[in-house]
Amino acid sequence: MTTSGRPELVDVVDEHDAVVGTVTRATMRADRLRHRCVFIAVVHPDGRLLVHQRSDAKDVWPGWWDLAVGGVVTAGESYDVAARRELWEEVGIDAVPHPIGGGAYDDETISVIGRCYRVEHAGPFTFHDGEVVRAEWADLETIGRDERQFLPDSTALLLPLLRGR
């Protein structure tokens, strides 16, 4: 739901990222429809990455760790506008993130076309929307080598771009 109480609308896209329909977010999740997402890496000036643990209220992968700020692009919204919106909503940053790549990700849970961005920021951060339980800085090379369970979509799409692979 949006803050206005109306259901959030999401564009459904084909494998070429062309819009083929518009549905509610709930329908998109229930039917595992391909949609657009943004993934923004918040990088400290010293090179560490801001990672955060998701709220247990999230509709996908609750309680997991994420290496990206981001989310679903709403119907009619551009990737760039969504990236700025997500930065503000999730961590309180009013900045223009720089595009670094993107691609498709599919698994048994989701199907997305994602655009990846990078923004350099040392904080402080404000977690406006309650989606973040806690956050910390992590070294890029150690992500995935500890007990934390990271989201597979941002790990697959964003991490290789950040590591230069």
Image (tube, helix red, strand yellow):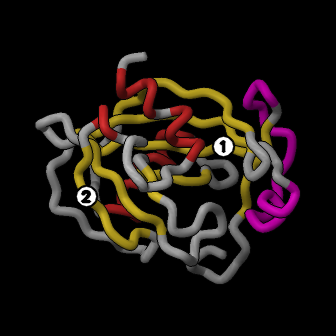
Closer to the observer: label 1 or label 2? Answer: 2
Q: Earlier in the sequence, mark 1 or mark 2?
A: 1
Dot 2, crowdedness within 10 Å: few (<14), some or many (≥20)? few
Marks 1,2: beta carbons within 8 A: no
- Quadrant where the N terminus sits is bottom right
The residue carrying mark 1 is 36
Amino acid at dot 1: Arg
Residue at x-position 69% and y-position 41%:
112
10 Å crowding of disc 1: few (<14), some (14-19), many (20+): many
Cα gap from disc 1 to disc 2, whole angstroms: 27 Å
Q: Which residue range is magenta in the image?
A: 15-31
Residue 60 as seen in the image, left or right of residue 89: right
Say which residue label 2 marks. Answer: 136
Identify which amino acid the numbered label 2 is placed on.
Answer: Glu
Q: Secondary structure at mark 1?
A: strand
User: Residue 119 sits in which quadrant?
Assistant: top left
The residue nearer to you, when weighing 136 against 99, is: 136
Residue at image coords 61%, 61%: 61
